[in-house]
Amino acid sequence: MMSFESTFKIRSFHTDSFGHVNNARYLELLEEARWQFAEHHGLIELLNEEQLGFIIMQMNLRFRFPIVEGDTIQVFTSLVTLGTAVGEVEQLIKKQGTGKLAAKSMFTFVLIDRHSGASVPIEGKIRELLLHIIQPKKGSGEIP
């Protein structure tokens, strides 16, 4: 399965006084891309039915080169690991037109019960859906 692609045009409000995308804005763009990924695969609807949700428990974000106002970026989102309690989503940000890697991230998530807030095993219909979209990572899993 191919990774899911989201495209964003970088606007002035994404940038800081140095003229490049602020590190906090990267997190917002990556989050929006994860929501698009989840909606595309029908995950949001299923989570709502099951009264479950995902929360991020750990993240790693490595910047490679700056993105500036006027750039168009592509965010490639993939589910790369799925355990019984946690999973990992890898996201790559590339500058459109050049394919140059601007940033790479790895988000580790857990599934929670929306009523209790407690983490729960990734099983049942959610697990079945995720197993259909997983794209195992290559190599050691380190972020270069």
Image (spheres, grey):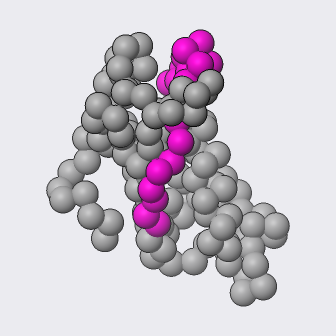
Query: Does residue 93 lie above or below 85 as drawn?
Result: below
Residue 19 percent across, percent down from the top left: 73, 82
Residue at the spot 61% in from the left edge and 63% down from the top edge: 26
* Quadrant including the C terminus: bottom left
Is residue 44 at all visible to an observer of this figure? Answer: no
Residue 34 versus residue 19 in the image, above or below: above
Is residue 142 positioned above or below 53 on the image?
below
Q: Position of residue 44 (x, y in %)?
A: 59, 24
- From the viewer's side, name the closer residue of 92 and 98: 92
Q: Quadrant of residue 99?
A: bottom left
- In the orientation shown, which residue stands out farthest toward the bottom? 18
Q: Residue at x 74, y 73 (%)?
A: 15
Q: Nearer the viewer, residue 34 or 88?
A: 88
Residue at the limit of the structure toward the right, as seen here:
13
Q: At which x and y percent is residue 50?
A: 55, 15
Q: Nearer the viewer, residue 65 or 91?
A: 91
Q: Is residue 4 visible?
A: yes
Residue at 25 percent across and 41 percent down: it is 136
User: In the image, which residues are magenta?
Assistant: 41-61
Residue 111 in picture, x, y percent from top left: 46, 33
Q: Residue, x 41% and y 49% (percent of image)?
A: 108
Q: On the rendered structure, is 31 left or right of 63?
A: right
Whether residue 47 appears in magenta in the rendering, the answer is: yes
100 left or right of 55?
Answer: left
Q: Quadrant of the N terminus?
A: top left
